[in-house]
Image: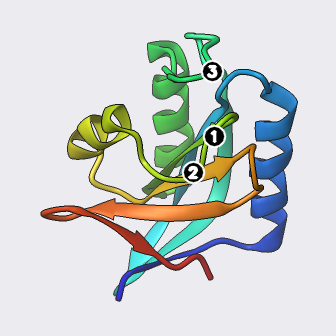
């Protein structure tokens, strides 16, 4: 089974970012390498939610470009998309599911309600995968 490998330091960075951005959704790009069934996160690139919304997030084209340039410079690939749900569970919304089709990497969601951190992949359906 596929899984996301995320060090405690990176988890803490994502959770801290999510809490700091409340009441809006936070977002980030995760860079690393996929080895076998493991999506290994090596670098977290925190981004701004230009929607400034509690229910949606958008990363600006400028930040996306900067993120991809950093990944390329460090010979990494995108291995995950992170965002938070400040007022709901850590499960993909219908909007998330739509965008997961365009970004076929793990999506990691943090819940501001119960502090859950969960990862999902879109196959024929959305499946939860473990975070190691």
**For the residue carrying disc 1, how many other residues have a C-alpha within 10 Å: few (<14), some (14-19), or many (20+)?**
many
Q: Which mark is residue 67?
A: none
What's the mark number on residue 84? 1
Q: Are marks 3 and 2 in contact (CB under 8 Å)?
A: no
Quadrant of res 50: top right
Front in this rendered view, residue 75 or 57: 57
Q: Is residue 39 left or right of residue 113?
A: left
Coordinates of residue 16 in the picture (x, y in percent) = 86, 45
First-in-chain label (1 vs 3): 3
Q: Is residue 99 left or right of residue 53?
A: left
Q: Residues within 10 Å of mark 3 (few under 14, many from 20)?
A: some
Question: Residue 109: which numbered mark, if any?
Answer: 2
Q: Quadrant of the N terminus?
A: bottom left
Q: Which residue is mark 3?
A: 54
Q: Position of residue 85 (x, y in %)?
A: 62, 38
Q: Residue at x 66, y 50 (%)?
A: 110
Residue extending farthest to the top is 51
Q: Badges 1 and 3: C-beta atoms under 8 Å apart?
A: no
Q: Secondary structure at mark 2?
A: strand
**Most foreground residue, 76 or 55:** 55
Residues at circles 1 and 2 in contact by the CB criterion of under 8 Å: yes
Position in image of residue 111 (x %, y %): 68, 48
Q: CA gap, disc 1 to disc 2? A: 5 Å
């Amino acid at each position: 089974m596929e899984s996301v490998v995320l060090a405690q330091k990176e988890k803490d960075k994502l959770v801290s970012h999510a809490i700091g951005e409340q009441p809006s959704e936070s977002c980030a790009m995760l860079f690393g390498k996929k080895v076998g069934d493991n999506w290994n996160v090596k670098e977290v690139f925190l981004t701004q939610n230009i929607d400034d919304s509690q229910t949606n997030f958008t990363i600006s084209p400028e930040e996306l470009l900067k993120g991809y340039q950093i990944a390329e410079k460090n010979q990494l690939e995108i291995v995950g998309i992170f965002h938070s749900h400040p007022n709901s569970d850590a499960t993909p919304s219908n909007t998330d599911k739509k965008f997961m089709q365009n970004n076929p990497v793990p999506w990691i969601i943090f819940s501001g309600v119960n502090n859950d951190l969960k990862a999902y992949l879109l196959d024929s359906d959305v499946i939860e995968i473990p975070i190691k």
